[in-house]
Amino acid sequence: MKVYLKIKNFYKRWNITYDEGRKFIDFKNRALSTIDDVLGELFLSDTNLEQTFLKLIAKHYPHSKSGPFQDINKFKEIVSQKKFENSAVYKVISGENNFVEFIKFLEVLFLLNLPSEVKDGLYFSLKEDIKLSLLDIQIKRIKKDNTIFYPKGAKLLDEKIVNDVLDWLVLYPKVQKSFKSALEKYQNKIFQRNLIDDLRLSLELLIGELLNNNKILANQEILLAEYLKQKNIPKELINMYWKLIDYYSKYQNNYVKHNDKVDSSEIEFILYLTGTFMRFLLTLGDR
């Protein structure tokens, strides 16, 4: 049995409520240990790296400046006596008690100019920390230098409709950018119409790429039907696919464009529906 399942069963066996607050505390402690293990020495030996991180997260922490070291051995000795727990990075990250802000700090770590093997170590360690803490979030590496965190819904849906679609969209950068933007807004609980717009745009761009045109989504019915017919898709499925897109577009026109706020449950439904639309097209390939 996997370790995280044993932890989950322990709390269940002892009838302990493992709420979101406790999950966050446990994850935070694990993540801090991971950052210390993977990045601690790098931050201690490179003040520019530390300053870059603080600037990216819009935090200021005063530093005393010292001149360049002529004696490299003396420099190494001073660094060896430092502790990561006393660094500005550790103090800022450990002092953050807002869950979304803390996740943002972790995501920013992947924006730093770090060796690929270091980013790999950070990625896999944080992925394990998430599992052990039983958090309903996922970490996803779209490319080696593009790592995001996002809320996790049903595991099957996340793997097939979110993860796979993100991977396959590497071939369509504009589409991927729009879909990724929607995921990031969802992660940060920005439940506004521009999130829905990003989802619609990602589908519209993908269909345009496949059909080699720049038409808006509502004007693609005939060409899309011909494309699907060439892929040997049954006419019943073609009709059903477009019918769903038609309702999808009407929802956008009737509700989203005239209202700033959108209910989170509606957004999750539209997110997975958009992923399903795109996954279907992306799986056709050379069929």
Image (cartoon, rainbow, N blue to C red):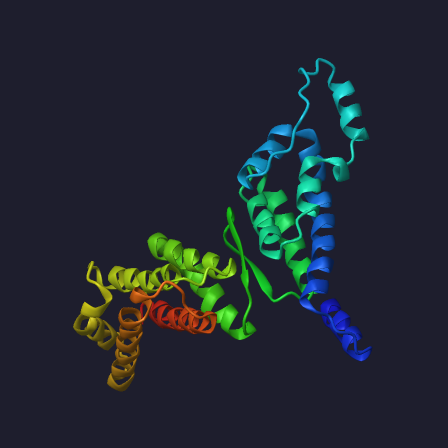
Q: Report x, y in % for residue 157.
A: 50, 73
Q: Is residue 244 left or right of residue 97?
A: left
Q: Quadrant of the C terminus?
A: bottom left
Q: Report x, y in % for residue 259.
A: 34, 66
Residue name at image x 71 percent, y 13 percent: 70
Q: Report x, y in % for residue 196.
A: 37, 64
Q: Quadrant of the N terminus?
A: bottom right
Q: Quadrant of residue 272?
A: bottom left
Q: Is residue 72 left or right of residue 225?
A: right
Q: Report x, y in % for residue 210.
A: 26, 63
Q: Is residue 101 left or right of residue 206?
A: right
How many numbered dots are placed on residues in this image?
Answer: 0
Q: 67 above or below 224?
A: above
Of residues 165 and 187, the one drawn nearer to the viewer in this rendering: 187
Q: 91 above or below 231?
A: above
Give the farthest residue toward the bottom. 236
Give the farthest residue toward the top. 70
Residue name at image x 20 percent, y 73 percent: 221
